[in-house]
Image: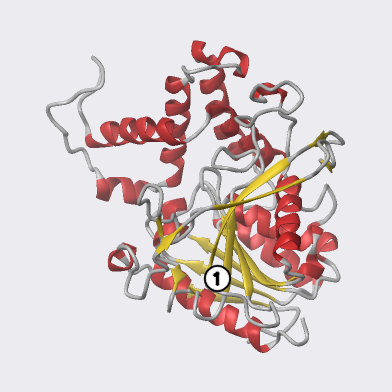
Amino acid sequence: MVKKGTVGIARDGGRRTGASHSPGGAQGSVGEVATRFHQFAHPPGTLVLESGQSLGPVEVAYETYGGLNAEKSNAIMILHALTGDAHAAGIHEADGRLGWWDAMIGPGKAFDTERYCIICSNVLGGCKGTTGPVSVNPRTGRVYAMDFPLITIGDMVAVQRRLLDHLGIDRLLAVAGGSMGGMQALEWLRAFPERLCGAVVIATAAKHSPQQIAFNEVGRQAIMADPDWREGHYDGQPPSKGLALARMIGHITYMSEASMSEKFGRRIQAPHQSHKFSNGFEVEEYLHHKGRRFVERFDANSYLYITHAMDSYDFSRGEDMHRALAGLTQKVMLIAFRSDWLYPVAQSREIARACKAAGVDATYCEIDSDYGHDAFLLEVEQESHLIRHFLQGLEAARGTC
């Protein structure tokens, strides 16, 4: 156990965990699941955003795995990354799709559904069931498109808090998420610390660096430069080329040089070539494939709104970070990956140092992995070991948190 006011550093090896990536992994599966929905903010306009604009009604798509105990004290909220959704585990009844963090959620897994009730919802501004630019504006009867108000990470967390109210959960055991999910976990600590005992913050930043903003801006410009974007008002013909290009750019940042060399090298994938200047390299075809698949499942306007929210986020609101953390009694686990150049370890270390300065009970864990930013989805064995022990510590201290 790390004493309050210290930051423990765990340096784990980078063993590959391919066997754990299969459906259900070595442990059990939550089985077939369905997405549920909750609507609030009646009458329309009763959800006030950080911008001062109002929105409503708001519908939230969410899934739950495992069950609440009698005291409702075993709930954990999983927070998804930029292009994720509420379907975090199990096999979806509608399309047979496996949850994006299935290797981590289920009986005997890191987020053990035999011990915990796991909740995951699609973020505000998303396109997978929660109100966003693709939703119908009740004032006009047409989709919001660019009439949707700008949103923040804080707005996303406020909607999640309203979902907990609906579920009758006063206090979470923990929140947990990587990348943009890590930003949401930090915001939970800032906005509603009284509603949780701890937070697992993975591969993220307290605020974006100029480089991180730059990558997102290039992706947004790719979408808005597509003639089919039509100032966000596209019907039937989305800006597929621009959105695919944004996804291709993103995938480059999610991997590391080592993982790309191992996965692709300079191998040729004959005979298909996407254009005259393509050499048919496997890495080229991989990026085009990812771009095409992304267009099939994600909305371009949602991409614009969500990346803007990420770039705008600043946990400390411009003050010294340790001052923003002062007084927190919640336990925090920070996990970073050495090959992650999109969210480099320096950003997690900065949060860890601020926790130490603020007297927060925090543990910093740095994992040696070749997977780059994608490691938070792939390094199942190392993450599971760390998270499992952290959650058990929260349970042991639950009466005092």
Q: How far across and down, in percent of the image, does residue 168 sit?
A: 73, 67
Q: Residue at x 28, y 36 (%)?
A: 283
Q: Residue at x 81, y 71 (%)?
A: 328
- Is residue 61 among what the camera can see? yes
| SS class, disc 1 | strand
**Which image quadrant: the N terminus?**
bottom right
Residue most toward the left? 271
Q: Taking 264 as reference, is 215 above or below it?
A: above
What number of labels is visible? 1
Along the line of sight, the residue nearer the viewer: 256 or 148: 148
Direction from residue 158 to residue 129 in the image, left or right: left
Along the line of sight, the residue nearer the viewer: 188 or 280: 188
Q: Taking 222 as reference, is 188 above or below it?
A: below
Q: Quadrant of residue 321?
A: bottom right
Q: Taking 315 as reference, is 368 above or below it?
A: below
Q: How far across and down, in percent of the image, does residue 297 sit?
A: 44, 36
Q: How far across and down, in percent of the image, does residue 139 sit?
A: 77, 24
Q: Quadrant of residue 107?
A: bottom left
Q: How far across and down, in percent of the image, does residue 24 sit?
A: 35, 67
Direction from residue 168 to residue 391 in the image, left or right: left
What residue did someone put label 1 on?
Answer: 365
Q: Residue at x 64, y 30 (%)?
A: 133
For label 1, the crowd category at 10 Å Cα-Cα, with few meaning under 14, some 14 to 19 and many 20 or more, is: many
Q: Quadrant of residue 70?
A: bottom right
Direction from residue 24 to residue 314 in the image, left or right: right
**Which image quadrant: the C terminus?**
bottom right
- Is residue 248 among what the camera can see? no
Colour pattern of the rendering: secondary structure
Inspect the image, locate mark 1, and give the three-letter code of the amino acid beneath it.
Answer: Cys
Q: Residue at x 33, y 51 (%)?
A: 258
Q: Taking 373 as reference, is 8 above or below it?
A: below
